[in-house]
Image (tube, grey):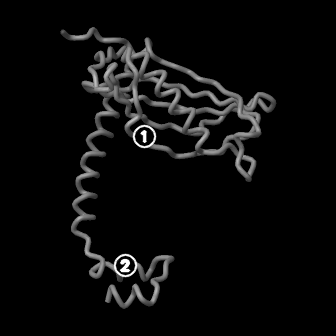
Amino acid sequence: MSLPAKPVSASRTTLTELMIPSYANFGGKIHGGILLSLMDKAAYACASKHAGEYCVTVSVDGVNFRQPVDVGDLVSLMASVNYVGRTSLVVGIKVIAENVKLRTVKHTNTSYFTMVAKDDDGKPTEVPPLQLETTEDVRRFLEAMKRKELRATFGEHFDNAVTRMLLHENVDKLQSERCALADSLREELS
C-alpha cells in the first residue's frame, strides 16, 4: 500500500519564543544549546505533522551561528520538510531574531535536521512522499539530495583517511599547530 503524497505546506511550522534572561550565557547572549533545543522542537513538530508518526532526530547539518541572539529578542523558527526518503525526512529550519523595540530582524541560523519516523513499536516506518508545490520546494529537495550525497562521500573518505592515518608518520604535521607534545609522548611517537 503506497501512501499518498503530502504537500510541503501541510507540515510547514513556525515556533516563536521570547528569549528570557535565564536563557543567557555569561556574555549576555542566548546559549547556543537553547537555540538547538528550540530547533529540535520545530523539526519534531514539522516532521511529525508530515509523517503522522513520532519522529526522532538522527543528525543535524549546518549548525552555524551567524549572529548572536539577545535577551528580549523574539526568535522565530520556520521549519519545512525539504526532502523525504522511505522512513526519513530532512527538515530545513531558518531562525530569525527580532528586536521589537528597535524594529530589527536578523537571520541567525539555518540548519537541516534529519528525522526518522517511528511506529508504535519504535521501529522505522514509511513516511508519505513529498508533494513539491513551488520552484523553491524543488530547489530545497534537490539541495537536500546533494547534501546527502556529499555527506556520504565525505564520511567514506574521512573514515578511510582516519583508518589509514599512522600517528608516527603524521606527527610532524603538528609542528605548525598550536599544540605541544609532552616529553614522554614525543619519545613514544619518534
What's the amino acid at mark 2? Lys
User: Disc count in the image?
Assistant: 2
* Residue lying at 37% horizontally and 14% vertically, measured from the top left: 133
> What amino acid is labelled 1 in the image?
Val
Q: How far apart are marks 1 and 2 (CA)?
A: 30 Å
Q: In this view, does 89 lie above or below 32?
A: above
Badge 2: few (under 14), some or many (20 or more) residues near its Cα, within 10 Å?
few
Residue 182: horizontal and vertical position, in percent?
46, 85
Q: What element carries label 2?
A: helix
Q: Position of residue 73 (x, y in %)?
A: 72, 33
Left or right of residue 16: residue 140: left
- When the figure is inspected, residue 156 is found, relative to residue 63, above or below; the finding is below
Q: Is residue 159 above or below residue 24?
A: below
Q: Which mark, residue 173? A: 2
Of residue 117 and residue 86, the one placed in the foreground of this image is 117
The answer to which of 7 and 115 lies nearer the viewer is: 115
Which residue was labeled with disc 1? 60
Where residue 157 appears, as percent x and y from the top left, is 24, 57
Q: Quadrant of residue 175?
A: bottom left
Image point 34% across, 24% down: which residue? 117
Residue 37 percent coordinates (x, y):
56, 36
